[in-house]
Image: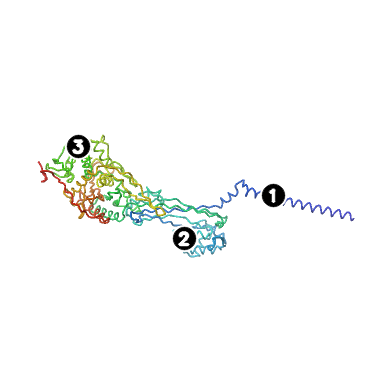
Amino acid sequence: MVRTGKTKQRGTARRVQLRLRIGLGIMLTLLLVVGGQLVLIQGFDVGGLAEAAQAKRSRTIELPAQRGAIVDSKGTVLANSIIRYDVVIDPQQNTGTDSYWRTDPKDPKKVIKISRDQGLRDLAGLLKLDFEDVKKAATGTSRYKLLAKGVKPETADAILALSVPGIVTQGTSQRVYPNGAVAGGIIGFLKDGKDGIAGIEQTQNSVLTGTPGSRSFEMGADGLVIPVAPDHITPAKNGKTVKLTLDSDLQYYAQQVIQTQVNNLGAEWGSVVVVEAKTGKIVAMADTNTPDPNNPGGVAAEDRGVRSVTAALEPGSVEKPLVAAALLETGKSKTMEQFSIPNSYTVNGQTFQDSFDHPTFNRTLAGILGYSLNTGTVMAGQRLSKQERYDWLRRFGIGQAPDVPLPGVAGGILSTPDKWDGRQEFTVLFGQGVSQSVLQTVMAYQSIANDGVMLQPRLIDGYIGEDGKEEKAPQGPSRQVISKSTAKQTRDMLESVVTEGEWKDAAIPGYRVGAKTGTSESPCDNGRPGFCGYTASIVGMAPMDNPQYIVEVLVQRPQDKIFGIDGADIFRSVMGQVLRVNNVPPSTGKPVHLDQFGPGGSSGTGK
């Protein structure tokens, strides 16, 4: 019996040891499996599980760049953007969280536990909303609820720092135009508040837009930002400020003056352009019915552009000084050369008449310009070959689009001589059978004012970065169109138009002025045959002892008067304002009075 009992005890002990060994083996196997998995995940990560888990937690939101401003030459803001944020919450995510962790605002190295109610109370305080209203909005099973719109950036940053479960801020950019319609067509506007589709907003879109930034962080399965995980911010690079050459005060003045004139004359539209003679800077470029970029739909589609550069019209007699300059430069005529001019002149089967009846009389080349004689212009201008007429108009920029950063810039129409008919080869001499924009005409006169050197027009003066440093905009190459001597002689003839010729009303007290008017028949729109009204303009420069500014005023299809700007009152008004506000000293030299008639022709009549 004793032996049998001992045998049983030994058998029991062996079974216990066996169980222990088996249990230990299982535990060791499990530890080996778990350890192996840890080695695979943390050491080798054969399946990329760690990266996948991190990627699942990672979130990236865009930090919008602020669109650059557009300012005038004095820094007056014409267009600006403000960044605002919409605050939204995922109620389902927020409702399922009783408490969460966030960075301690007193010690960024620590995290503190915050109750759901406390987090929502802090959020309500930043949004200046009632706590109960915020809690109600944050409770439920929906996935989206808008809490606030148009929150300032600093408030949005503070909201994100709260780490409230389910909270997201969505950046938006609002474009504002504080001066309304002042230079509205030039500034342009945006589509859907993002991309420029007109004016400077369009042509400088890439410069103004900037580069968005980003914020990358990790979020847990509960929708909470993990406080101790990496939080990387790439700041947005804001767009540059575009500085224009415009003077917004002069721009406003010119817009008001031309709009009043167009309304008084019942005209379709009008334009005023002001350019600095020595720099090519466009100081003002005013059109009527200018759009307000805050509400571009408030005007008709055809009024939303800049007609000063997009509309190409027959210029009329403002072209005659260019022909006179070509005659002087080539030595084919002189300022005081006398011509006997009939009322009707026929050449190559084409007959030309002046705008008024007169007997045959004597006029100098200066007198032909001073009294705007078509007959005399053809008589003198035919000394230039057809190719020379074409080449000289090209040299003055006609038929070539000016290099100005606006959409739809017109080059005008200047057909080659082989396409001219028997009449057009002569009408181009007095601005018919050729078309050009107001800016093209102004820049041709700029070369005369600037001793024969034509500059590229400048509308953008420079670009200003976030650091405040200004980078000057490049300007295209200048070129010598006519000699300094020819430019001076042409200016003297233009001044004599005012002192001795037909446009004495263009004179401005205290300043010497040179100017020329133009009137042409305006072809009908929509392909209709014939002419529908007139295009009337006047362009001039001052002061003639040292020209600083060129001004052109154009009125399209005035109903009240054929010479829609009779008396040159708008030109005088705008030029006078430009000279005054820029503190241009009054003229000190004696005005030029060139003989309009020549020897024996002072009576104004002839045989």
Characterize the local packing of mark 1: few (<14), some (14-19) or many (20 or more) Cα atoms within 10 angstroms: few
Q: Nearer the viewer, residue 418 or 140?
A: 418
Residue that mark 3 sits on:
383
Mark 3: which secondary structure? loop
Where residue 77 appears, as percent x and y from the top left, is 36, 56
Query: What type is the residue that disc 2 sits on?
Result: Thr
Q: Which of labels 2 and 3 is toward the front?
A: 3
* Picture coordinates of residue 149, whole percent (x, y): 45, 58
Label 2, label 3: how many angstroms apart (C-alpha)?
A: 76 Å
Alpha carbon separation for disc pair 3 and 1 = 107 Å
Q: Which quarter of the image is occupied by the C terminus? A: top left
Residue 71 placement, left or right of 536: right
Q: Work out whether residue 456 or residue 5 is closer to the camera in this orientation and state it.
A: 456
3 or 1: tag closer to the N-terminus: 1
Disc 2, SS: helix
Around disc 3, counting alpha carbons within 10 Å, would you say few (fewer than 14), some (14 to 19), or many (20 or more)?
Answer: few
Q: What amino acid is labelled 1 in the image? A: Leu
Residue 597, compared with residue 230, is above or below; it is: above
Q: Mark 3 belongs to which amino acid?
A: Arg
Residue 20 falls left or right of residue 158: right
**Is 276 placed left or right of 19 in the picture?**
left
Q: Which mark is residue 155?
A: 2
* Gap between marks 2 and 1 measured at Cα: 53 Å
> Which label's residue is closer to the chain start, 2 or 3?
2
568 or 485, nearer to the observer: 485
User: For mark 1, what is the residue?
Assistant: 32
Residue 543 appears at what percent x and percent y?
23, 51
Dot 2, crowdedness within 10 Å: few (<14), some or many (≥20)? some
Residue 99 vertical position relative to residue 323 in the rendered view, above or below: below
Label located before the other in sequence (2 or 1) = 1
